[in-house]
Image (tube, helix red, strand yellow):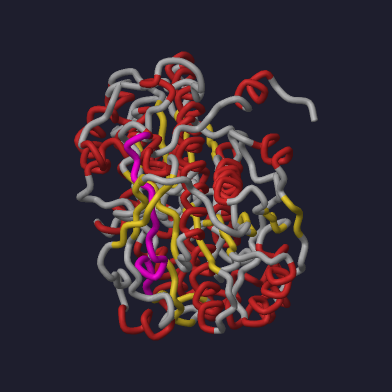
Amino acid sequence: MTKSALQIARASYEPKVPEGLIGNVRIEEGAATESVRDQQEIQQLFPHTYGMPVVKFIQTSGKPGLDNPLNVGVILSGGQAPGGHNVIAGIYDGVKRLHPDGKLYGFILGPAGLINHEYKELTGDIIDEYRNTGGFDIIGSGRTKLETREQFDKGLEILKKLNIRALVIIGGDDSNTNACVLAEYYAAINAGVQVIGCPKTIDGDLKNEQIETSFGFDTACKVYSELIGNIQRDCNSSRKYWHFIKVMGRSASHIALECALQTHPNICFVSEEVAEKEQSLDDIIDYIAGVIAQRAAQGLNFGTVIIPEGLIEFIPAMKKLISELNDFLVHNQEEFDLVRRSGKRDYIISKLSQENADIYASLPETVARQLTLDRDPHGNVQVSQIETEKLLAEMVKKRLDQWSKEGRYKGKFASVTHFFGYEGRCAAPSNYDADYCYSLGYTASMLIAAGKTGYMSSVRNTTGPAAEWVAGGIPITMMMNMERRHGEMKPVIQKALVELDGAPFRYFESQRDKWAVETDYVYPGPIQYFGPTEVCDQPSKTLQLEQNGKISL
């Protein structure tokens, strides 16, 4: 495999780790825990793994190690996120430090590899090829859901055959929910297999007091912010386009908010605020058009708008429509598929409540069709396929044309649309993600050595120097609540939404009126891997504000 100069240089980078993971460690346990909501239901569903304490590792004297070798399996589940290879490298190094004869097995293409018994041993030579690199290509990833007893039993066969004592599932909230269910099942049948999760998702919506951030968020946001900064430089150079930029983030607006904090766009929507204020699509269009008119009055016929991927779902009226569509199509997909394409719109309208039918009928044909495309694995509309950025650009143009006729707007409007998604998912991890991910993986191996199951690897205090980071674990049941999925109530990890009273949003709110009318663009440039620590090791603006209450320049 031909390597770039950056790949060659990054291969020698040694991730920084918490002092608590250096040498021998002892475990310190806190008080018993409970789920974030629906405590009685969650406890009944997870009697063997509910209520366990939060734990942390503390450096102690003595030589680290186990008397017997430890075999561990690892799965990459769901979408890619920068740093996954370093999580695996951290697990490998931890396993080898505990006993040199320990082995790490990777299951191919996600959970399906466990079910189908497709795997490979990850040796030192393989691991060294992938340290500090982006992507999940070391073993591949997949979106197969581990949720049935038959799958669990089939997986147990290969785990027993390979003498694997523990399985690490690297994934987002749904993947870690599955890890929790698997841990409970294996504990209930005394399978002798532990299950540990690692928090992965670029969306940033898997976090709480113990999980400060999901890995990959830092890198992805820096990639998107570089692109947005480049667009803003072009925008400020040609001075004739409004750029509508949609970024990842279906369930939460963490990416949009972080990119806004890094680049200072003229407009950025936070879906959670739209829902809180019960804004309509008309409200959103009026706001964008109003900012455009204000800037046009100054002779500034250009600007940038950042749109979170899931915005349309947070508009209350649209949310009700989508919810009814999801429930209807779960039970009537086969019948819907048989309807001719030309008749699908009328078919849907005839099946919805009057309120939602009226809204659906008012939508442009393209958006209406996109709302009925194939659902995701959880039975929900795939909002990434809804071209919200184009919808808003088109509707804003119509509004401005109307205002122009009324004498309320005098300017020139031309738009360019973008969607940044996959561009950020497999980038070479930033120093922050390289360090954080390695520590998460190494911590996972220590949780296994301590006999823990049903835990998620946790590394905290990450705005400080890496030596001062705190490594430990959090029971996955602590993050669970009950939610409706496929028309049924199921236990899932609660997604972390943008907190409107949190420091990141409050700072954004204090600045956005200024950013709207002024051209206060910031151009972050590409991720820096070498150079001053204040440039190379800086965590996200979101984390800085959450932990320290201020942003480092």
Residue toward you, 394 or 308: 308
Name the image quarter holding the N terminus.
top right
Q: Position of residue 114 (x, y in %)?
A: 70, 66
> Is residue 80 visible to the viewer in this orientation of the structure?
no
Total numbered labels? 0
Q: Which residues are magenta?
A: 467-481
Task: Indicate the quadrant where residue 359 lies.
Answer: bottom left
Task: Indicate the quadrant where residue 138 lies.
Answer: top right
In the displayed structure image, the side of residue 405 where residue 509 appears, left or right: left
Residue under the image location 33 percent in, 24 percent down: 296
Q: Position of residue 9 (x, y in %)?
A: 62, 21
Residue under the image location 37 percent in, 45 percent down: 61
Q: Position of residue 144 (x, y in %)?
A: 65, 66
In the picture as drawn, the residue positioned furthest to the right comes out as 1
| Up-down relation of residue 144 to residue 225 (above or below) | below
Decide whether residue 473 is among the magenta residues: yes
Decide whether residue 77 is among the magenta residues: no
| Up-down relation of residue 201 to residue 31 (above or below) | above
Residue under the image location 29 percent in, 19 percent down: 298
Residue toward you, 132 or 507: 132
Residue toward you, 314 or 447: 447
Q: Position of residue 135 (x, y in %)?
A: 64, 41
Residue toward you, 39 or 316: 39
Residue under the image location 45 percent in, 61 percent down: 450
In the displayed structure image, the side of residue 369 where residue 440 appears, left or right: left
> Is residue 460 visible to the viewer in this orientation of the structure?
yes
Name the image quarter holding the C terminus.
top left
Task: Indicate the quadrant where residue 523 lies.
Answer: top left
